[in-house]
Image (cartoon, rainbow, N blue to C red):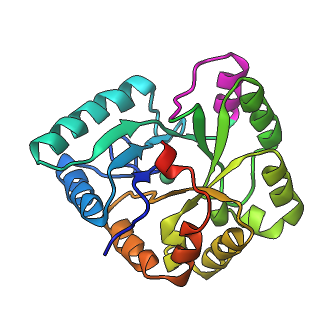
Amino acid sequence: MNVSPLKVDVHSHLVPAIDDGIQSIEQGLEILAEMEALGYEKVITTPHTFPGSFDNTPEIILEGLEKMKAATQEAGINITMEAATEYYMDDVFLKMLEDDEPLMTFGNNYVLFETGFMSPPPFMKEAIFLMNIKGYKPVYAHPERYEYLIQDKQLLEEMIDRDVVFQMNLGSLAGAYGKPVQKFAEKLIDQKVVRLVGTDCHHIGHIDALKKTIQSKYFQKLMQLELLNNTL
Ligand SMILES: [Fe+2]
């Protein structure tokens, strides 16, 4: 089984014990070995930056990344690792933007952000606007998982029009987040608005979901889209 033609993953929680992802190096190595076997060559891991829950900084994330990279090499796993973060879009994030605090990015200035599942922050459009004028490219983590977006066609159109990069979670196609999320993910593929895909891997269970996704009909449709993954 192979995830081909995909080579690069852009969303995961593979820095030990700094968020709700892997809690040990061993757990990370088990996942990375599976990912290598599935054909991945590069993993851009994105631990949460979520004030009050996961108070991460670039320093904490990069220090953890170095440990994980060293262990990966030692274990003979042939995967390149980089790190960015998944920002929770709250008022702290908005203030960082307003204060011109540098954000953690990947690739060509991409910034991964998520919102609450039931409702977006009232300033979501403003924050996206600020990211754009400051030269960042906003990446919307797992849009298919937001209850509010499933319900709001107009907001969906606006997000597409504002050139927000849609990053779908691969496990969504295997029903890992429930049937409505799977259906919405399929709809976004049919609309050809998915530009990036990620495992959002927190634990080995997400690799099982990934294997199911690879065998799904929509995975083939997804691979026909012009994804940005392999350019990173
Ligand atoms: Fe995530």
The quarter in which the N terminus is drawn is bottom left
Q: Foreground residue, 4 or 211?
A: 4
Indicate whether 32 appears above or below 72.
Answer: below
Residue at image position (82%, 35%) is 126
- The answer to whether residue 185 is magenta is no
**Side of 144 relative to 4 (left or right):** right
Where residue 15 appears, as percent x and y from the top left, is: 32, 42
**Side of 191 relative to 109 (left or right):** right
Give the image quarter of residue 182.
bottom right
Residue at image position (34%, 74%) is 208
Residue at image position (53%, 32%) is 105
Where residue 90 appears, as percent x and y from the top left, is: 67, 38
**Side of 72 relative to 158 (left or right):** left
Where residue 110 appears, as percent x and y from the top left, is: 59, 36
Indicate whether 58 appears above or below 45.
Answer: above
Residues drawn in magenta: 91-106
Q: Foreground residue, 125 or 111?
A: 111
Residue at image position (45%, 43%) is 46
Q: Foreground residue, 80 or 48?
A: 80
Give the image quarter of residue 103.
top right
Q: Residue furthest right?
A: 154
Give the image quarter of residue 31.
bottom left
**Side of 61 relative to 52 (left or right):** left
Where residue 82 appears, as percent x and y from the top left, is: 37, 37
Is residue 153 visible in the rendered image? The answer is: yes
Indicate whether 120 appears above or below 168.
Answer: above
All told, the count of numbered labels is: 0
Indicate whether 186 appears above or below 20.
Answer: below
